[in-house]
Every structure is written in structure tokens, then in C-alpha cells.
Amino acid sequence: MRRLHYDDRVALDVPDEVRNKALADGNAAWLDDLPSVLDALARDWSLTIGAAMRGGHAALVVEATLADGTPSVLKVGLPGHRRQLAFEATVLELAAGGSCARLLRRDLTRDALLLERLGPAMFDVVPDPSTQHDMLSDIAARLWRPLGDDIDLPTGAHVARRMQDLIPQLWEELRRPCSARAIADAVACAKRRERAHDDGRSVLVHGDIHEANALQAADGTFKLIDPDGLRAEPACDLGTIVRCTPDAGDDLRARTQRLAARTGVDAAAIWDWGTVHRIMGGLNSARIGFQPFSRLLLAEADRLTQTG
């Protein structure tokens, strides 16, 4: 952690993942400016700022308390992520506090969102990975809904097309941390998902559902946080559930079939998205030093391509 001093009184620890991401993107100045940004937001929104929270890497997330005592979470995104933060706010507004954390305030000129504060992550509360996966698929299904043409979100086709270029690029930049065969497999899967995209059948999807992005609410249920926000096929969300918990020890083909049976979504599409998410997650995690998650994902990708 890097310690910053907020308003000359509170020492704020910036998680290593956030600091590494900022430095990797050339945004060291953003780290230096954080105390003044937090001070201004606290003043304008009548907040008391608390401790930094772990979990993400594209934003600083801190505990905050409103003037009336309501606990909340303040999220300040890294430079270059404003459009993504806008997509996140759109998803949270559409979910309206149901399947996702409630959005309390937004100020995209300062890359800031104020959110409902939730409890522990699913992986701390639900020990069995299979139960986690089933619960995550149920939460995802509650979020899926048709979208009007006026909703500004990227499509699954756009993401799949971008992955076809980004995956080989990152692989080379990171000195080829997995096999060329695994990379080729992920690119082929992305091409299939691009061709399969149909705006008329697309729904609102989260885009990054996993056991650390589902937090427990006061009533014991779970809500999602940190949505990417896409107009895509439901398989895109289920693919992230196939990617998650790479050390669970289960057969990923069987996991895919179980999720397909539970949701009525095509298993082949789920598998394709799971492959793309696995490689992309592994490469991105390697880029910011998030281990052992990166090694686990990329080793699984290599194993799967070796065995068929």
C-alpha cells in the first residue's frame, strides 16, 4: 500500500493494485492529486471519508459516511476511465438498487460515484464454489433486461472485436506468459461471439460477475458491484462465472453445462465467453502484478487447449 495524507488528518492507504495500475498507465500525478480530490468531494457531498477498500484496480474506493449517518462508498476512477464509469452509472441506475448496489450520487467531471455500502463479499460468506456459481448466475439473470435504443452502452460485438486485437497485443507486451495455442483459441472464440451478436436479442449485462463482485446486503441477499455495462448476449455474464475461482478444482465443461441448464443459455456461447474472459483476465492481472490469480488463469487456459 502507498500511504497518502487526506486533509492533513487522515492517512489513506492506496491499495497496491490501484497504485500499480495508475503507474502502469502513466498516471503517477493522479496519485498525488487524490487527497485534494477527496477533500473537495467530501466537502461538496457532506461526507466523512474513511478507510480505503481493497478489491478493484481501476479506481480508488473508500468508505464514506453521509451527514445523516448513512454508510456509503466513494469511488474515484483513474484517468482515462470516465466513459467506463459512465457505463457503470448507467447500469446502476437501470438496476435501481435491485440486483446491483444503489447509486446515490454521481459526478463524472471528477470521475466519482457515491454508492450504497454493502457487506462482505460472497467468497467470504459462501464457502462452496459451486453454490457461488449458481447464486451468481441467479443474480445475473435478475439484471438481464431488454434495452431501448437510447441507452448508451457498448455492445458485446464491440468488446469481442476489441479482444481480437488486444489479447495478442498484451500477450506480446507481457513476453508471452501462456502458450500461443491458448491465445489463438481465445481469439477464435472472440470472433465467434462477434459474428453471433444480435442487437435484437441482446440484454443488459454486467460484464464482470465473480464472487468478489457480489456483496451481501442487509437482508442477506447479494448485490453486484463494478459493472462494466454491456448490451450483449447473457452468455457474456455466464462466461465470467466460468472464468472465476480457477482453483476450485471442478471440471469447467461441467460447470458450463450446469450454468446453461440453470439459465437456458447456450453452453457453447458460455464456453466461448469463458475462454475470452480467462485469457483477458489472466493478461490484465499479469500487467498489474495481481498474483497468483494471473498464473492460475493462464495455466488453466494452457491446460484446456492442450486437452482439447
Image (cartoon, helix red, strand yellow):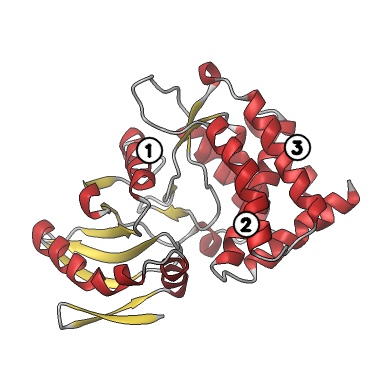
Compared to residue 295, the image places residue 77 above or below, namely above
Q: What residue type is labelled 2?
A: Leu
- Label 3 environment density (alpha carbons within 10 Å; few <14, some 14–19, many ≥20): some
Q: What element carries label 2?
A: helix
Disc 2 or disc 3, which is closer to the eye? 2
Q: Is mark 3 on a helix, strand or loop?
A: helix
**Are discs 2 and 3 less than 8 Å apart at CB?**
no
What residue is pinned by disc 1? 91
Q: Is residue 93 visible?
A: yes
Q: Is residue 248 visible?
A: no
Q: Which amino acid does label 1 sit on?
A: Val
Which residue: 24% across, 48% down? Answer: 108
Question: Which percent across, then down, holds residue 308?
Answer: 88, 45
**Quadrant location, the N terminus:** bottom left
Give the mark, 2 or 1, whose residue is nearer the N terminus: 1
Which residue: 20% across, 65% down? Answer: 37
What residue is pinned by disc 3? 257
Question: Which percent across, then down, holds residue 18?
Answer: 42, 68
Q: How many labels does the image show?
A: 3
Question: Which percent across, then down, holds residue 55?
Answer: 46, 64
Q: Which amino acid does label 3 sit on?
A: Gln
What residue is pinned by disc 2? 170
- Marks 2/1: CA–CA distance: 28 Å
Question: Which percent across, then down, holds residue 250?
Answer: 77, 54
- Marks 2/3: CA–CA distance: 30 Å
Which residue: 43% across, 62% down? Answer: 120
Q: What element carries label 1?
A: helix
- Marks 1/3: CA–CA distance: 28 Å
